[in-house]
Image (tube, rainbow, N blue to C red):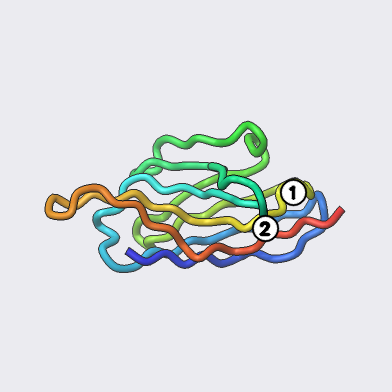
Amino acid sequence: VQLVESGGGLVQAGGSLRLSCRASGSTFSINAMGWYRQDPGKQRELVAAITSGGGMTNYADSVRGRFTISRDNAKSTMYLQMNSLKPEDTAVYYCNAETFEPKSGSNTYWGQGTQVTVSS
């Protein structure tokens, strides 16, 4: 499975961005997906996660009510709509996918990351 993020950039505080993560390869094996972020010198943290069918979502307390995660399995794409952005949201955002295949078992895949910078 290969994951490619897009949609990052520079935005002013209070603005919005939408990140996309397009999956390719064995996309049939993808179960849960998520968005993580990492600031230099800090640990990578979970921002939001979504189940395979999109029926359940989970958010970090710091983004709940401002960010919305969704996925379109027909397009093999996951999204993160980020509204009311704050300077503390500045980080590299990574796409994550959990897969399962009978032969290889469970695996975790990461995208290359996309920079989000929020200016005050």
Instruction: State the image coordinates of residue 88 (x, y, percent, origin top left).
Output: 75, 46
Real-space CA distance between mark 1 and mark 2, rounded to the nearest whole angstrom: 8 Å
Instruction: State the image coordinates of residue 24 (x, y, percent, origin top left).
Output: 34, 67
Element marked by disc 1: loop
| Residue ID at (71%, 48%) | 89
| Residue ID at (58%, 44%) | 68
In the displayed orientation, state which residue is furthest to the front. Answer: 41
Instruction: State the image coordinates of residue 44 (x, y, percent, origin top left).
Output: 56, 47
Amino acid type at mark 2: Leu
Q: Which mark is residue 55?
A: none
Q: Circle 1 is placed at which residue position?
A: 85
| Residue ID at (48%, 56%) | 95
Q: Circle 2 is placed at which residue position?
A: 17
Instruction: State the image coordinates of residue 62 (x, y, percent, origin top left).
Output: 67, 35
Q: Is residue 21 above or below residue 60?
A: below
**Cβ atoms at labels 1 and 2 below 8 Å apart:** yes
36 or 74, nearer to the observer = 36
Amino acid type at mark 1: Leu
Q: Is 94 situated left or right of 98 in this image? A: right
Q: Is residue 17 above or below residue 89?
A: below
Q: Quadrant of residue 77?
A: bottom left
Q: Is 117 situated left or right of 119 in this image? A: left
| Residue ID at (25%, 54%) | 29
